[in-house]
Amino acid sequence: MSRRTGILRQRILYGMAVVAAMLLGLGSRQWAGQLPPFAAEHLGDALWASMIYFGFRMLWPTMKLTGSMVLAVVFCFGIEFSQLYQAEWIQSIRGTTLGALVLGKGFLAVDLVRYSAGILISLAIDSILLARNGSATT
């Protein structure tokens, strides 16, 4: 398999991981009442961060895993800290469904822990799968 084909294959797999994390995250919100309380409370945010991590992997599949992890942490933490900014224009965006999903609604320090957990679990899964395929980049 050529390098170009390998990168395309990786992008497709990471894209599938993005979609899976997105669907699982939305499902964890939609059916929170059927989940154990701990999962209902924390899973959505961890899966959102997982989606961001795999999104960066999809965009830059040859980047080192630690680079993707750092980008995902900076992005997720940046979004969370941006919630401290309460101008009317951004609040109107956050008032929409898409705006709330992307930008959140209000700062919660515990979200930083949830994001970190989601990114670290995604990094571990990614690392294991890449090692199995003999193409790990740390």
Image (spheres, rainbow, N blue to C red):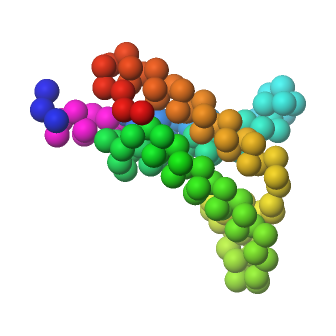
Task: Give the side of residue 38 with respect to residue 121, left or right.
Answer: right
Residue 137 image position (x, y, % from top left): 36, 32
Task: Give the side of residue 21 with respect to residue 42, left or right.
Answer: left
Residue 15 visible in image:
no
Residue 106 image position (x, y, % from top left): 81, 63
Q: Quadrant of the C terminus?
A: top left
In the picture shown, does residue 82 fall above or below 63? below
Seen from the viewer's position, the closer of residues 41 and 2 is: 2
Task: Give the side of residue 84 with respect to residue 67, left or right.
Answer: right
Q: Which residue sits at x=58%, y=57%? A: 75
In the picture shown, does residue 105 fall above or below 88? above
Q: Which residue sits at x=38%, y=20%? A: 131
Seen from the viewer's position, the closer of residues 119 and 34 is: 119
Count up the numbered dots: 0
Q: Residue 40 is drawn in which quadrant? A: top right
In the picture shown, does residue 82 fall above or below 37? below
Q: Is residue 9 magenta?
A: yes
Residue 41 image position (x, y, % from top left): 82, 38
Q: Quadrant of the N terminus?
A: top left
Q: Which residue sits at x=76%, y=48%? A: 111
